[in-house]
Every structure is written in C-alpha cells, then in structure tokens.
Image (tube, coloured by chain):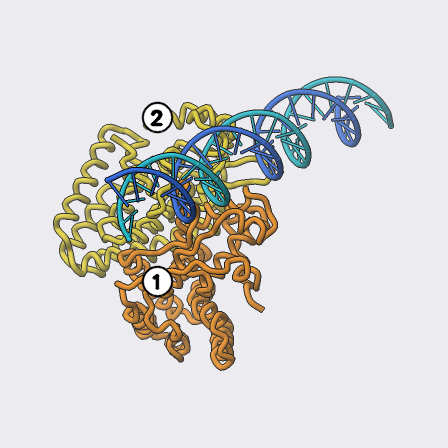
Chain colours: A yellow, B orange, C blue, D cyan
DNA sequence: CAGCCTTTGATTGTTAACGATCAGTGTCAA
DNA sequence: TTGACACTGATCGTTAACAATCAAAGGCTG
C-alpha cells in the first residue's frame, strides 16, 4: 500500500535496483524510522538489499547529493543531521515555494485534481484513527508533494519532495512532540481555499501551516540513535 | 577571474577533485560551450582531468542527478537535451521562485548586498563591451544565482543554480538568437525596484524578464553537436 | 588507578582486470 | 545496388582483490 512514490530520477533512467535502494532509504527517512546520525555501513546495506557494493555506494552518493545522507571521508555514511540554520532555510524555502504553488492553483482550480487530494487527506485520517504512526507521517509529508504534483510541474515536484524529506529529518531532530505532524484539518482548509479560488487565503494557510510546524521545533537539543538497521529497511 | 563559484555540495564534504570535475562541466554547460547531446565519454574525461575512471563516473552520476547529464545504459553519458515540456517547467519554476525571492528582498532591502549585485551587473556590462560571449552568458545566468545568494538562503540558492544551469541548456537548444542573453538593463531595473522597496514591481520585472527569455525560444527545432571536448574543458 | 601508546580488526577508498553490450564496418546474396 | 548479417573495435558495467584509513581494545608506564 505504501511507497507508490515511484522515485524516477529525471528522464535519465537510472538502474531500477539503484532507484529502489534510494527510494527505500528515502521513505524510511520520511517516515522517521531512520533517525539522524544513524550509520549506514556499506556491508549492512549490501546484505540488506542483496546487491553489490557499487550499487550501495552510488545510492549513497545520490542521497548525499540531496542532503539526506552525510558522507564523511573514510568514516562512512550517516543519515544527515541538519543544523539549525539549515532547518530554518529549508522551512523558509518551503514556505516560499508552497505559498506560490497554492496561490497559482487557486487561480485556476481543477476540481478533479482537488478530489484526488481530498482522497489523500482521507487516507491521512484513516491512518490517524488507525494510529499508524509511520503511515501518518509519510502521508502528511507526501500531501505537500502531491500538492506540487497536482500543480503539474515535475521540476517543482522533485524540489519539493527533497525539501519535505529534509523536513522529516529536521522534525526528527528538533521536534518536541513528534506525534503531532500536521495538525488535524489544516490540509483540508488549504484545499477548501484553493477550491474557493481564494489565492491569498490559500497562501496564508499554507504559510501558517508551515510556521506551525517550524515553531514546534526546539533548535537546541539534539538526539542520536544508531540501532537495528536491517529490520528498518525491510518493510514496505 | 572566472569560476569563483565554489561548488560546495552540501555540508557533506565531497572529494575536492570530484567537485572540480563537476564544477568544470557545470560551468561549461552554463557558458553554453558544451552543447546538448554532446557525448561525454569516460576515457576522454579521464585523460582530460587526469583522474581515474571512478571519479569521472561519480561526477557524471552527480550531474545526472541534477538533470545536466543524461546517462544512457550501456551507451554512455551525454549532455542532457531537455524536452519542450521540461523547458516550460524549468522556466515556470524559475518564475515562481525568483518572483518570490525578489519580492522578499524588496520587503527589507539590504543596500550593501544590492551594491554587490550592482557590481555584478557592471561586470556584465564589461563583458558586453568586450564581446566576451562566454563570460557574458555565464555572468548573466549567475546574476540570478547571486540574487538568491543575496537573499541569504543557501538551500534556495542551490536550487536556483540548478535551474539556471538547465536554462542555459534550454536556451542552447531552442534559442533563436542566442547572442541576446539577458536584454541590456533589465537586471538593473530589478535591482532598482528592490532598492525602492517596491515588491510588486520587482516581482513583475523578474517575471517579465524570464518570460522575455522563454518567449525567445522556438520549441520545435533541435540542434546537435559533438565536437572537440578536451579543449572545451581545459579553460577556466 | 589514570593516561598514553600500540596493536588489531573492521570499514572504506582505489585500482585493475574481466565480461557484456553496442555502434560501426565490411561482406555476401538477392 | 541494396538489404541483411556477421564481425570487430571500443566503450560501458561489474566484480574482486588490494591498499589506506580509522576506531576501539588492550597493555604499558608513570
């Protein structure tokens, strides 16, 4: 049911096995099952995915290029641990991009696509009542990506996916009460504003929504974890 | 004098040699000295940069992740050839991002940073009178990156750099009169609007500027080239 | 007992050789 | 003459072994 994300890296058709590894780690980070500072040792990943070292190595390089993984020379790969500054920049970038996206969407509302988004929100609600933490976190983040996808610009979509994933990392580090991901019905209200063609309201709600998340962060404490690994990446 | 760009890939310190290769190809594409569809064969790049095959390979992968290079299985690496759809998306994304950036900058103008940008425009003028085509193209594109840098968000800056470079590719393919890159004084007018604190005007000028470029494209004809190579990447 | 040094084990980075695939060329037959 | 087929050369993808580096454990000395 999960991971329909189909991580296509450009038109350039990267090897499917490689894309799979990247996607696995990607979603694992998105679902906050891979905590920052977690070591991603090559041998472990090799046996986890049953592939050669080269594939793992290239996947890690791709993840590093997206800021998801931190490659330290002669020391291995670790899940990235964004700095407070980086955290602010990511959320500022999201605010800037998402505000404009929803405003443009409100300028010419497409009801069919909005229906799909409402469906997505329903899945979120379902995960909420099921108390499926991972699923809820993933869906909450993916909503914003789906928003960009509905806007129809794949370049922007890719950018936003990167930003959203990094946000998951940030919330994982600095979040005080990580249980509350996207508070209740804010997503629905954004969709309503778009549907009503009220661009300013939609933009305001989107900005407020992001501020609501970023203000729930305490940019001082860190936490680290380096457990399990092979069990984490096995699911989905 | 050129290539002060210091292509730092995240905080994650990638090998300097590798970054150098990426940066070389990056700027070569930006200056439109590497045409789309140009083959980047591994042996050629190896002897050009005097490094092993692995470095070249990783550099190509990084470039592919940014949409600059197209990796075709068992066929080699080529400078990417964006489709018309991709071209529209890139310019739409730029419009969305740059509009917001200049608007925010106008909200709280920083004269010292604006002075640096005016200095940059002066360099453009100098290159224009010198008829230094490559330098002018590079500076014209880099102006937009500097704009993002002046805004102070490194995440956005990195994104915009990617978009600007892709724009160079697009103009290289679809541009009818490639000589005219950024028409005359539009950059200055944007800076003036920011300095005056007129956000709407600045955003409008930025959008107009980008539309001016994208409307100068003919999204039907293609051209290809596969010449020299080792001479192109030697400079800078 | 504490601190420093050495050693050891594991993990990463690099290189080289091998196998697979593709584009171009030449030949043969219709 | 033209089309298809096989061959060849080169390039790419992969694997495996080697070298370099680092972190932790253990022992030595003050």
- The chain ID associated with circle 2 is A
Image location (x, y in percent) of residue A65: 46, 46
| Element at label 2 | loop
Image location (x, y in percent) of residue A93: 38, 55
Image location (x, y in percent) of residue B204: 30, 72
Q: Is residue A4 above or below residue A82?
A: above
**Foreground residue, A132 or B212?**
B212
Viewport quadrant of the N terminus of chain A = top left
Q: Which residue is located at x 29 percent, y 69 percent? A: B211
Question: Picture quarter containing residue B72?
Answer: top left
Residue A122 visible, this orientation:
yes
Q: Which residue is located at x 42 percent, y 43 percent? A: A170
Q: Do the residues marked 1 and 2 share a common chain?
A: no
Residue B115 visible, this orientation:
no
**Foreground residue, A210 or A28?**
A28
Q: Which residue is located at x 39 percent, y 49 percent? A: B70
Question: Picture quarter containing residue C29?
Answer: top left
Viewport quadrant of the C terminus of chain A = top left
Disc 1 and disc 2 in contact, CB within 8 angstroms: no
Q: Which residue is located at x 27 percent, y 67 percent? A: B218
Image location (x, y in percent) of residue A77: 52, 36
Mark identifier at residue B223: 1
| Element at label 1 | loop
Mark 2 is surrounded, within 10 Å at the Cα level, by few (under 14), some (14 to 19) or many (20 or more) other residues, namely few
Mark identifier at residue B54: none
Q: Mark 2 = which residue? A: A235
Q: Is residue B190 above or below residue A186?
A: below
Distance CA(mark 1)–CA(mark 2):
47 Å
- The chain ID associated with circle 1 is B
Residue B89 is left or right of residue A167, and the answer is: left
**Foreground residue, B228 or A179?**
B228
């Amino acid at each position: 049911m999960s991971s329909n994300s189909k991580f296509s890296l450009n038109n350039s058709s990267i090897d499917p096995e490689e894309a799979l590894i990247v996607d696995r780690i990607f979603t694992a980070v998105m679902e906050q099952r891979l905590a920052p500072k977690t070591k991603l040792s090559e041998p472990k990943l090799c046996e986890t995915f049953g592939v050669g070292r080269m594939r793992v190595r290239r996947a890690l390089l791709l993840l590093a290029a997206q800021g998801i993984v931190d490659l330290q020379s002669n020391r291995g790969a670790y899940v990235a641990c964004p700095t407070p500054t980086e955290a602010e920049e990511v959320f500022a970038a999201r605010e800037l991009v998402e505000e404009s996206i929803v405003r443009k969407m409100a300028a010419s509302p497409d009801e069919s696509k909005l229906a799909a988004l409402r469906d997505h929100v329903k899945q979120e609600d379902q995960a909420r009542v099921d108390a499926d933490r991972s699923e809820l976190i993933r869906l909450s983040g993916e909503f914003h990506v789906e928003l960009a996808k509905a806007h129809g610009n794949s370049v922007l979509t890719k950018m936003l996916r990167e930003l959203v994933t990094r946000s998951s990392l940030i919330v994982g580090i600095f979040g005080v009460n990580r249980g509350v991901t996207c508070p209740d019905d804010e997503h629905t209200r954004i969709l309503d504003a778009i549907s009503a063609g009220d661009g300013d309201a939609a933009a305001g709600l989107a900005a407020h929504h992001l501020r609501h998340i970023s203000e729930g962060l305490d940019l001082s404490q860190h936490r680290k974890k380096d457990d399990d690994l092979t069990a984490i990446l096995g699911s989905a």
